[in-house]
Image (spheres, helix red, strand yellow):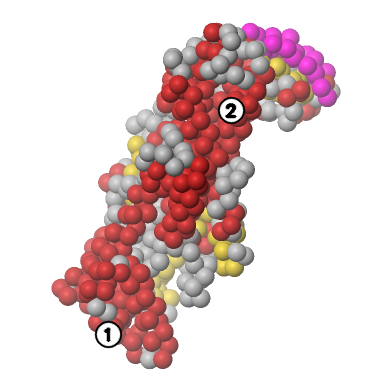
Amino acid sequence: MLKLKNKLAEAILARLDAKNDAHGLDSDSIAQMFEYPPDRTMGDVAFPCFKLSKALRAAPPQIAAMLADCVEIPEIAKTDIAGGYLNMFISDSYLSERLSEINMLGDNYGRFDFGAGKTIVLDYSSPNVAKPFHIGHLGTTVIGHSLKMLHEFAGYDCIGINHLGDWGTQFGKLIVAYRLWGDHETIERGGIDELVSLYVKFHEEAEKDASLNDRAREEFTKLEHFDDENIKLWKWFIEISLAEYSKTYKQLGIEFDSYNGESFYSDKMPAIVEELREKKLMTLDDGASIVNLEEFNMPPCLILKRDGSTLYPTRDISAAKYRKDNYNFDKCIYVTSAGQSLHFAQWFKVVELMCYEWAKDLVHVPYGTVSINGEKLATRTGNVILLKDLFAMSIDKVRGIIKEKNPDLENSDEVAEAVGVGAIVFHYLSNSRIKDINFVLEDALSFEGNTGPYSQYTYARTCSILNKAASTGGAGEFTDDTERELVKVLAKYPEKILSALSDYEPMVITRYILDVCNAFNRFYHSCQILNADDESVKNTRIYLTNAVNHVLKTAFTLICIKPTEKI
Ligand code: ARG
């Protein structure tokens, strides 16, 4: 309804100007003011007049009355003044036009092109190699990928980067552990789980024998100096880990454009350190090199440890510079848990102090913490659920349901995977990203009510109707209120895309999918579609079903869910 809001805003602006042009509003700010009334009987769009009261020196209901006749356009069937609101009821002709537009645009409905020619870099997922990939990583992975899809939908060129945590002392620890207790065969067979056990064992043993930590540091230093044997092991650890991550990414339908992780910047950091020195931003603090950020109410940003080794911020600053030079991004977006907010604020500030104007284009998108059954995630106590195990449980459950309800389904494995994985993603993305979430397995695996499986089932229902229909329908008169309500929901898709983009919030799309499904199911239960008596009524309903099909299909893809045509 974006266009309608703009048109109404123009009309209202003209009327306001004629009355008293000291109101200080333009058509954009007026367009922002429209609201959707909570109850259908109050109209479809409302214009609140309270804010205008001061400038126009009139009571809100009076202003509403003064504006009423200027919105008498073909799109509006009726107006009503209630309190300080001008309530508007949308006409059938407007809805009918929208329905035709959606059908005409098909999968392009909701797309924008304002991103054309601009590049967005997205840094997401980015797990630490050889550590477990658990539900704490679900957030960065699916929020990051949704933001990528949303930006692509708006026309941007997007580069997805998996900034692997593939450098640091943990590799020294792994190398030591592997040489002491590891075995090639076992790791090849057991994959990342074996690496994780070695890592855990290292920590247990180091509690008893602290010299192990010194040995680990030595091995990492050797790695930093390209010791052949250590490089070989390190590469192998990464390969083993990536093989495992790839399975999860494949289930989610995610591909990255680059896997340049922290190690990639090893040879690029000295130049950055030198630049910080030249720009006189670095000071020594107890032997370590830092950028003091007291003035900005932040603790110092650490650049070099006492022994001269680099740190997490050093790598991030180098990576940002590299990305600007190579991709010339309009925005570089980082999706991590809110626990890292200070880290990003600090090094973004350092980039600004280095006088790079693109510091303003660095965006941190944080998300809340995840706990399991009320307890914090903790690798050490074993309170983690691996993402692959969670997906497997969900897929199994779907497989069971399919076996019982639709045993002859073709590609049942594929469907079980899409619906099972989709259930978890949908559950997670139903919450605002910044909210801390308590992951209760039972809830995530409950498919009742407003869930992923319910939405995917609704989508499959539209596919089945369309498969049976002889045509893709056509625009005719509306004969049932559920039809009108459905088009009104569908008409909101473009503005939902804008709001998800401006808030970096996939939840907007998840919730919208439910609105579409609920409106469609109300229509489905209230109307005969393929069996409608009247040919024109039937065509309109098929047309509606087709529109829902397109919107759901693209919306699912925007939140990392694979649409399934049959369940
Ligand atoms: N590897 C880090 C972690 O697991 C996340 C990296 C995020 N990206 C970045 N450029 N710092 O916590």
Estimate how packed mark 1 is, as few (under 14), some (14 to 19) or many (20 or more) residues with alpha carbons within 10 Å: few
Please state which of residues 245 and 164 is positioned toward the viewer in this rendering.
245
Magenta part of the protein: which range? 62-83
Q: Residue at x 65, y 23 (%)?
A: 526
User: Vertical placement of 238 versus 549: above or below?
Assistant: below
Q: Position of residue 247 (x, y in %)?
A: 33, 54
Q: Residue at x 41, y 48 (%)?
A: 417
Which label sits in the foreground, 1 or 2?
2
Label 1 – label 2 distance at C-alpha: 61 Å
Q: Residue at x 27, y 64 (%)?
A: 240
Q: Are marks 1 and 2 in contact (CB under 8 Å)?
A: no
Residue located beneath label 2 in the image: 520
User: Vertical placement of 497 versus 260: above or below?
Assistant: above
Q: Amino acid at mark 2?
A: Phe
Estimate how packed mark 2 is, as few (under 14), some (14 to 19) or many (20 or more) residues with alpha carbons within 10 Å: many
Ligand 1 contact, mark 1 (Cβ < 8 Å)? no
Is residue 280 something that shows in the picture? Answer: no
Q: Position of residue 371 (x, y in %)?
A: 57, 63
Please tell me whether mark 2 sits on a helix, a strand or a loop: helix
Please tell me whether mark 1 sits on a helix, a strand or a loop: helix
Q: Amino acid at mark 1?
A: Leu
Please state which of residues 20 and 552 is positioned toward the viewer in this rendering.
552
Would you say 289 lies left or right of 530 here? left
Q: Position of residue 228 (x, y in %)?
A: 15, 73
Q: Which mark is residue 40?
A: none
Q: Position of residue 295 (x, y in %)?
A: 53, 62
Residue 333 included in the magenta stretch of the image: no
Residue located beneath label 1 in the image: 180
Would you say 428 lies left or right of 189 here? right
